[in-house]
Image: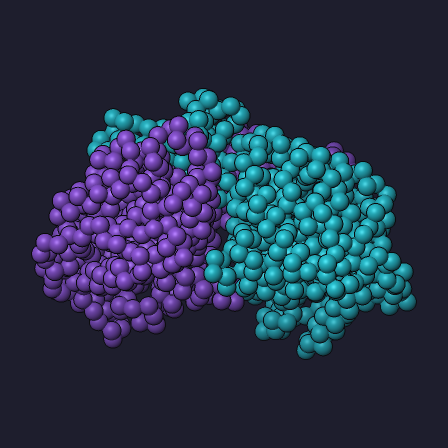
Chain colours: A cyan, B purple
Amino acid sequence: MVTGKNYIGNSLSAEGTINFKTFNPKTNSENEFIYVEASDNEINTAVSLAKSAYKEFQNISGQRKSEFLNVIADEILALDSELIKMYCSETGLPEGRAIGERGRTVFQLRSFADLVKNGSWVEATIETAIPSREPLPRIDHRKMLVPLGPVVVFGASNFPFAYSTAGGDTASALAAGCPVIVKSHPMHAGTGELVSSAIIKAAKRTKMPNGVFSNLNSRGIEVGVKLVEHSAVKAVGFTGSITGGRALFDLANKRKEPIPVFAEMGSVNPVILLPEAAKQRAVELAKIYAGSITLGSGQFCTNPGLIIGIKGEALDNFTQNLANEIVKIEPTCMLHPNIIGNYERNKEKVLSQKGVNIKADYENKVESNYGRQVVLTVEGKTFMKNKTLHQEVFGPFSLIVQCEDKDQLVEIIRNLEGQLTGTILSDKEELNNNKEIANALQNRVGRLIYNGVPTGVEVCPSMQHGGPYPASTDSRFTAVGIHSIKRWVRPVTFQNWPDEMLPDELRNGNPLSILRFLNGEETRDKI
Amino acid sequence: MVTGKNYIGNSLSAEGTINFKTFNPKTNSENEFIYVEASDNEINTAVSLAKSAYKEFQNISGQRKSEFLNVIADEILALDSELIKMYCSETGLPEGRAIGERGRTVFQLRSFADLVKNGSWVEATIETAIPSREPLPRIDHRKMLVPLGPVVVFGASNFPFAYSTAGGDTASALAAGCPVIVKSHPMHAGTGELVSSAIIKAAKRTKMPNGVFSNLNSRGIEVGVKLVEHSAVKAVGFTGSITGGRALFDLANKRKEPIPVFAEMGSVNPVILLPEAAKQRAVELAKIYAGSITLGSGQFCTNPGLIIGIKGEALDNFTQNLANEIVKIEPTCMLHPNIIGNYERNKEKVLSQKGVNIKADYENKVESNYGRQVVLTVEGKTFMKNKTLHQEVFGPFSLIVQCEDKDQLVEIIRNLEGQLTGTILSDKEELNNNKEIANALQNRVGRLIYNGVPTGVEVCPSMQHGGPYPASTDSRFTAVGIHSIKRWVRPVTFQNWPDEMLPDELRNGNPLSILRFLNGEETRDKI
């Protein structure tokens, strides 16, 4: 089924001259298929098709978009074991993870299908005319959210299903009414092509316009750069490194017409361990955190890379327990030799800094591409001065910061970069007595967690996945949950517009029976 | 009452060495007071105070913010004729306009006071725990909007009240819980200082933290640049030229931590005149448009600077009627010699382009600083080729584009830059038969108007004031109406957070009785 070609709209195409293969880190060898990077002509054709598809797709009913999204989910499931095997061969991740992530992806698609079928998400807001108002009559105004235009989605290395081809960015953009062009991730081009084939089948089955979806292979950065610079592209979704995300953000802002880039980038996800919790629950917390740090070989954006406590017996005890627990866990395969190469380099960089001590380092022999977990410690004052220690080390890594006192702890929190999450481990009274810690942490993160682990991101409306820069480029939006649709839309007001020409969402008769804000009151009533 | 000093938080201060005066365009002479530009030290102090005020202000109740905003409105009204006189002396605008704009400003402040008193605007979204869920228990998640931090507001030349010191940007940012630093507009520094005195009085009366508001004088761009580059500033509001807005946008995006800039910039506000409307209502429409083009000497961002029709007798007839009507109107004083200087220069630039013809030009003698209105025509094909003709000419100016046919009209619309508004003048059947015109226009604007004029921006929830770039830097937000508060906030999720530590908006008991999304249903219920 895999051809190695690009989907330029509904057509498979391979005009380009640059070829590449994907890699199986578990067997430490290349996979069989050859992928062809998209040519300039293919890039331009994909964008032209998206632009032209947008004219039709932006006005397609929520009902039809809902069918499209549900059929994408069905077609992904129909790929069955072929897809799961491909995923495993391109990531080294176990089958259970692949099946779980596929479930998450299907759930996301169906959540957006429900959202747009219901239709109330467009935030219809109406003020009807008051001809008798003094000194001037009030004119009828009606506002709703409309799609921005073609969206480019960059697949993530660590989530080939849930944050790549048919992942959260694609699902939310299609739900909004934006055609999507995926810049496929080179590490899982085969998985990307199979998922793309499911999307194209769904587009054909539900009669979506050609160009509503394209999938472009690329080995390096060129295809992505050309897409972001293309004048017909109106927004970008990205999940990956700070370097990559910032580069795209800068490109997009240098355009004659700047466009939004939603880059979900790195995070060290600080965990604040308060003394009472360390004292009372050192053993339990150490076990939980050993699991969280090594989950998926630490290859999650919410991996707890930084644990901050106050010096003393309790913290020492927790540290020792964590060190003991973490080496009990068998290392697992990382995604790609490049990923483990970066992990080893970044780990060495931290280890070479003055004042950093190793508490645990998995020492047994491991297979190629397996990531050895490590736990390090450093004093608060050393951490504060050395920004290298604030950077994410992507992998099964955690640094424990030993603060002198609470003041230093608060000072450290205040000077952290923006984070996806921040966790407090404490008992309730202790949290209540340390409100300034919670307040300081809130200003640095998108999600606050009490007595839990940051790994595991629930897909629900109340989830905020995104945080102050550099956790993401725009902290005002989430990348997870139905509210992520808001990234791809803008409001348009219709003033004094004839009823028969209004979108259904704004018509007097409210034919879709959606919730609307009508003259200040929320209602499903007709006008 | 005017001191010429800066408000650095609650204190008047004038450490700087650069002085300037404002100008009365009506008397064509300088006003008496001397203003002192803020020094680097004053800028840094204002930002430090704002940063420190934010720690308290971000957690102040909606009730108290509401009182603050209402007392600002009261204190502005209490300045009475002193304020109105100052406004008129710094703008050349008539007293009626000053009083009307003050009313709009007070209304905006009170609208935000109502919004935050009610409290439901934070979009509280809650999924409660389901311990029995398989395969994993669902953890309690609660999300709400929280303020971004200190906001810098740039006053607008053409709205000294409604889009300057205590205007829409300031009112919405304070309502959100963000301290505000105003970069006062040099053309109306006295009006700015008086309004600032009202805000500071209100801050003291309602016991807001020192630094919740500062007002900095500046003659040129330096103060603004330093503010936007300051690491403690978290967002920027701007109303003005494309050049100014884009420069601030670029500065903000080059920061180590980029911040959002909401710049509401230029717009030519295209008006599409369809043949039936031109044929049936040439006289009436010409009168209405003569008024709209010259309103406030054309110094509105929604001024109709471009009228696009299809060649023929009906369009000629409308053009002749508009030419006749517009010269009947007495020119009025523009805001400042710089503004009229730019107007004359930009007008000459358009007039010097090949194929541009004058249809009406007010020829009687006028006083210094009065703007002479002008109506010009150009053929569609000439307009398409010459982007100079697409630029805004700020003043009582309108260019009529004569298209060959409907296809050319649609092509011209598709190639327009982003606009705040787009208007269609037609009869209903004609609009219904020309859906592609409405669709094309919708993709280029923030607000669509049927059979009306773009001037006059209703302050209501259903208003979208903002549009695709360069109408504004972020089309996803409005600068007018209560939804403009969304520019200054971001969502934060509390996961498994103890009830007694949650913000009131998210607590089980719903003590504020706000509307919340609870497990997918909208309700005011307790949990």
- Quadrant of the rendered image containing residue B455: top left
Image point (44%, 34%), residue name:
B434
Which residue occupies 31% across, 33% down?
A: B277
Query: Is residue B350 placed above or below A144 in the rendered structure?
Result: below
The image quadrant where one finds the C terminus of chain A is top left
Task: Check the image and report above or below for A428 versus A354.
Answer: above
The percent coordinates of residue B238 (x first, y second) are 36, 56
Horizontal and vertical percent for residue B479? 38, 47
Residue occupying image coordinates x 20% and y 45% = B323
Please tell me which residue is depicted at 21% across the width and 38% down the height of the picture.
B287
Q: Is residue A348 above or below residue B151?
A: below
| Residue B410 lies in quadrant | top left
Q: Is residue A294 in sight in this rendering?
A: no
Q: Nearer the viewer, residue A384 or A454?
A: A454
Residue A222: image location, x then y, percent: 65, 64
Q: Height in image: B56 above or below A75?
A: below
Asked whether, in this view, residue A445 is left or right of residue B15, the answer is: right
**What is the tally of numbered marks visible in this picture?**
0
Q: Is residue A507 visible?
A: yes
- Left of B379 or right of it: where is A201? right
Residue B200 placement, left or right of A296: left
| Quadrant assignment, res B464 | top left
Q: Position of residue B98 (x, y in %)?
A: 19, 47
Residue A276 located left or right of residue B371: right
Q: Nearer the viewer, residue B88 or B268?
A: B268
